[in-house]
């Protein structure tokens, strides 16, 4: 078997044995499978492609087809110890909402983001005046799935705004050893190509946002009358 | 025997009719009791020594126990023949596969065409109204009588999927895994509406004779055929109908009358007339009623997640079809959301297909791949591999 991907190896170190893990965008379930085997976690995947779901199922994993933008509402508040979102936050339509959702469904979130403040990116923009294409961000602007790029500083600012605590941060770059960093250090905003964060809440999580039907299902809002669940079921736009 | 011969060679096929004595009635949700109860069933494969490899396959509205062997009336292959057999996802060399005709059915299990011991005449409309819960309770009686404590899996599509959900709610301790395909946790207004059209078609047939047609020696074939035609449209998609038939004509030119000019008309008429040969009109009334009454949340305080609170150890696989407008994908998502809410580990996939609700009987490689992977992984963790 080939070597474990660097970010996977780092995540493997962060996750407590026997914990409950939600992996958003789990692809064919490789990371979850690794966590199940190495850490005995109770894993759940969320994956957009049916082929990925089928592959995860064949590994014996529980995988729900869906995407992080829409389908985190499937999961009740604090159902997991960790929610993992690897390198896809910048592809979400509403990253701020997704980030707060991660820390609603889980006590801690493991999130990795490519840093648009990296020197190569800045240099590409400065010297060529065109959208940067780098190792971490290889696609041209018109076909990139990365629609919400941010710098390390931007991301830290968003964490502050959402009252999230940064429990750990590491800099990842292909072919280079993982390095623990302080993401508030200005130099890291130049140096880190991709940053992996372990986040937790400073305050108790709010229940599911914008009155999703899930609230009705768990009876968190007043309902039990016969009519109520039907309304709840149909409230999904 | 080896697997070299014809595809079904080497499978042990069993079955028959299990008769529960009058002292062991089926308690119905309506409060009535049904006795004596007979359950017609088929089995494929052999129960292992640990009695841990039993799979219950639950059939849909007009299905029956003839899952993977020749149907005695139509002479056609079993309704899920492409899924059950050596090397197929449900392999009788690994599993003991059971399929029962539902209560209220007409292929040997006690239903409205059975003889009421009190009157020595067919029940007709004196047959009690039954529910999905009643069907499952009867299945559970049979499984218990067979000496099986836990099913490795309960699997079903459409109404079969509803039975699987009911199993998870009523007998979670008897389940290891559950597969729910193209189903819903309750019947929608549109579902009930289509069924009502079918029932009215049957009841409008003068040969229905208020349900006593068997005694009268006639059959409401026209009404039942129309019911089937209407329902059959809901099993397909607009795209599938268009692809199959378009506006193609049966013959050159129009008849300028009401013959079946269009191929789609002829197809539906064929669906209707061939259906009446194998199905009982009153069974159709009773089973569609059972479906309409189905609302798993309503029987759990209006909260669907409550239905699955005791099923946290069960591994669920929920599948839907993108072009299914009878039980569309959001219905399956509601089930998954409730399962997650109850703390169950659930998997879900929407299979992209234009074949509509009936895709579940048809060749859908991704459906096979998904189910094969799920069952193989679960049987591995159950120690069956």
Image (cartoon, helix red, strand yellow):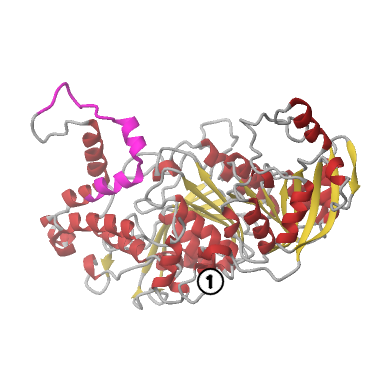
- Disc 1 on helix, strand or loop? helix
Locate residue A152, reporting x and y percent: 79, 47
Residue B100 in view of the camera: no
Instruction: Tell me the quadrant of the picture where the C terminus of chain A can be found.
Output: bottom left
Residue A126, placed above or below residue B376: above
Question: Which residue has dot 1 on it?
Answer: B306
Residue depicted at x 8% and y 30%: B256
Which chain's residue wears label 1? B
Locate residue B127, reporting x and y percent: 27, 69
Locate residue B330, reporting x and y percent: 46, 54
Residue depicted at x 69% and y 42%: A149
Please, which residue is most extreme toward the left here?
Answer: B257
Instruction: Tell me the quadrant of the picture where the N terminus of chain A can be found.
Output: top right
Q: Is B231 included in the stretch rendered in magenta?
A: yes
When asked about the image quadrant of residue A99, the answer is bottom right
- Taking depth in this image into account, of A193 and A108 the one nearest to the observer is A193
Please, which residue is most extreme toward the top here?
Answer: B252
Q: Is A104 included in the stretch rendered in magenta?
A: no
- Taking depth in this image into account, of B66 and A224 the one nearest to the observer is A224
Residue B191 in view of the camera: yes
Residue A47, placed above or below residue A77: above
Locate residue B288, reporting x and y percent: 31, 59
Residue B54, placed above or below residue B351: below
- Taking depth in this image into account, of B327 and B54 the one nearest to the observer is B327
B238 relative position to B3: left or right: left
When asked about the image quadrant of residue A130, the answer is top right
Residue depicted at x 35% and y 42%: B236
Residue B264, placed above or below residue B91: above
Provide the residue span drawn in magenta.
B227-255
């Amino acid at each position: 078997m080939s070597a474990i991907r660097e970010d996977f190896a780092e995540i493997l170190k962060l996750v407590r044995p026997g914990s409950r893990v939600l992996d958003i965008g789990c692809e064919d379930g490789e990371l979850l499978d690794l966590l199940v085997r190495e850490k005995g976690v109770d894993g759940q995947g969320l994956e957009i492609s049916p082929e990925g779901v089928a592959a995860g199922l064949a590994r014996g994993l529980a995988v729900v087809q869906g995407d992080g933008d829409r389908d985190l509402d499937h999961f009740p508040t604090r159902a997991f110890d960790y929610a993992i979102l690897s390198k896809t936050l910048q592809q979400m339509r509403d990253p701020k909402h997704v980030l707060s959702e991660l820390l609603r469904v889980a006590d801690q979130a493991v999130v990795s983001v490519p840093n648009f403040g990296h020197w190569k990116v800045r240099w590409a923009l400065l010297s060529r005046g065109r959208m940067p294409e780098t190792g971490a961000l290889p696609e041209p602007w018109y076909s990139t799935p990365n629609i919400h790029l941010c710098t390390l500083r931007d991301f830290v600012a968003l964490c502050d705004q959402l009252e999230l605590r940064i429990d750990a941060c590491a800099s990842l770059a292909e072919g280079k050893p993982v390095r623990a960093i302080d993401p508030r250090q200005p130099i890291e905003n130049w140096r880190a190509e991709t940053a992996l964060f372990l986040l937790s809440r400073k305050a108790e999580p709010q229940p599911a946002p914008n009155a999703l039907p899930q609230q009705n299902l768990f009876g968190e809002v007043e309902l039990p009358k016969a009519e109520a669940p039907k309304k709840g079921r149909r409230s999904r736009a | 025997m080896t697997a070299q011969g014809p595809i079904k060679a080497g499978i042990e096929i069993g079955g028959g009719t299990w008769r529960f004595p009058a002292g062991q009635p089926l308690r119905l949700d309506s409060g009535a009791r049904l006795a004596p109860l007979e359950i017609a069933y088929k089995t494929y494969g052999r129960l292992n020594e640990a009695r841990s490899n039993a799979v219950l396959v639950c059939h849909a509205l007009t299905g029956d126990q003839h899952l993977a062997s020749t149907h005695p009336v139509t002479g056609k292959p079993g309704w899920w023949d492409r899924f059950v057999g050596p090397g197929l996802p449900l392999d009788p060399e690994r599993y003991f596969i059971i399929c029962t005709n539902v209560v209220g059915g007409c292929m040997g299990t006690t239903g409205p065409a059975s003889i009421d011991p009190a009157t020595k005449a067919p029940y007709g409309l004196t047959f009690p109204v039954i529910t999905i819960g009643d069907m499952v309770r009867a299945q559970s009686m049979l499984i218990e009588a067979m000496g099986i404590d836990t099913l490795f899996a309960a699997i079903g599509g459409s109404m079969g999927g509803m039975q699987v959900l009911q199993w998870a709610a009523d007998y979670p301790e008897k389940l290891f895994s559950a597969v729910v395909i193209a189903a819903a946790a309750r019947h929608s207004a549109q579902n009930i509406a289509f069924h009502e059209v079918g029932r009215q078609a049957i009841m409008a047939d003068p040969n229905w004779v208020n349900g006593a047609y068997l005694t009268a020696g006639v059959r409401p074939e026209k009404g039942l055929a129309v019911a089937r035609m209407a329902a059959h449209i809901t099993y397909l998609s607009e795209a599938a109908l268009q692809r199959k038939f378009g506006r193609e004509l049966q013959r050159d030119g129009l008849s300028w009358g009401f013959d079946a000019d269009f191929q789609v008309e002829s197809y539906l008429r064929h669906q209707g007339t061939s259906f009446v040969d194998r199905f009982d009109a009153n069974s159709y009334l009773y089973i569609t009623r059972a479906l309409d009454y189905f609302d798993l949340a309503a029987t759990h305080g209006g909260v669907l997640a409550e239905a699955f609170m005791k099923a946290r150890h069960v591994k669920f696989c929920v599948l839907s079809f993108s072009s299914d407008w009878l039980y569309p994908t959001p219905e399956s998502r509601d089930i998954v959301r409730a399962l997650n809410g109850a703390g169950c580990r659930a998997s879900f996939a929407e299979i992209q297909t234009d074949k509509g609700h009936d895709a579940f009987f048809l060749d859908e490689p991704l459906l096979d791949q998904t189910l094969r992977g799920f069952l193989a992984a679960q049987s591995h963790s159950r120690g069956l591999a």
